[in-house]
Amino acid sequence: MPSSLVDQVRSFNRFYTREIGLLAEHLSGSEFTLAEARVLYELAQTQEQTAADIVRGLGMDKAHISRIVARFQNGGLVKSRISPEHGKHKLISLTAAGKKVFRRLNDRTEEQIATLVAPIATEQRQRLAKGMRDVQRVLKAEATSPKDVKFRALKVGDLGWIAHRQAVLYQKEYGWDWTYEGLVSRILGDFVLHFDPTREDAWIAELHGEMVGSIFLMKSDDAEMAKLRLLFVESSARGLGVGSRLVKKCIERARALGYRKLTLWTNDILVSARKIYQAAGFTLIEESQHHSFGKDLVGQTWMLNLEVE
């Protein structure tokens, strides 16, 4: 791991723990430590738990959990009973007094956070929330499956994102220069300027609420032939079938609109996209060398007969 990332994580930890008062002896002006508050929170989320359940849920030391539970029992905050399913297991739950204490602590914590974010502008709050979701998602590294990918129509802000993300990714992966962003911007601008909902469409792919792909169905000068354009999938979403599903949506929509053929132009260096086109039934009909985006490339035209399934 780069030392710069280690330093950044440590710096963030110092900043965040100071900002929300985690270094104080007790949490939110209460009599509870952070660890005790976490145990209270866990117990408040379920009817009953064993000490082992709490240990697994919080990743804390078993002896530490035992001491906290014992203190809560002495204070009348929790009660326990033998599990009817396993005689050696004790089920722990909050008493009425414990629930009251938790609600008071929880209210104070929410008030503290509300005070912390109150001066922040709305857009910055949204940025903060997204950043925290990203941190959780990256560090937790939850397994992602194709069913987590959702598709929707275009909305405000999408076109700028598409031009930006495609240009950034293709510069990183293929070394293309800023003129590619100009091409994408021009294509999208023409799409908006001459948009015909009876002949055109577009889709955005989202994963956990974040945009990860796009594709466009565009008209051509030939009323019987449509164009598949600007297929794009973020590197973070590859392997989930996003590209194939976007292409399938485009093909199905083209058929529904009565087109007889669907064509696309790409470059042979975009190997993953070419494999998707081939799998969908497209046939290579023409290719030629050209110099674009600061590189010598081989452009390709592919065609799909929509009258054949």
Image (cartoon, helix red, strand yellow):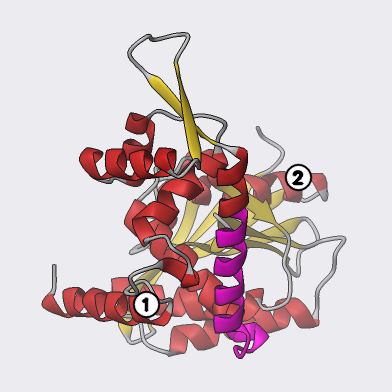
Residue 70: image location, x then y, percent: 34, 39
Between the residue at mark 2 and the residue at mark 1, the CA separation in whole angstroms equals: 54 Å
**For residue 169, side relative to residue 251 (left or right):** left
Q: Secondary structure at mark 1?
A: helix
Q: In which quadrant of the rendered view does residue 22 lie? A: bottom left
Residue 122: image location, x then y, percent: 66, 84
**For residue 283, side relative to residue 295 (left or right):** right
Within-10-Å neighbours for mark 1: few <14, some 14–19, many 20+? few
Residue 83: image location, x then y, percent: 45, 14
**For residue 167, side relative to residue 2 (left or right):** right
Magenta highlight range: 102-124
Which disc is residue 255 wearing?
A: 2
Q: Pick whichever of labels 2 and 1 is earlier in the sequence.
A: 1
Tell whether position 156 is magenta. Answer: no
* Residue displayed at 37% across by 77% down: 16
Nearest the eye: 221 or 44: 44
Which disc is residue 160 wearing?
A: none
* Residue displayed at 41% across by 40% down: 74
Which disc is residue 16 wearing?
A: 1
- Amino acid tagged 2: Arg
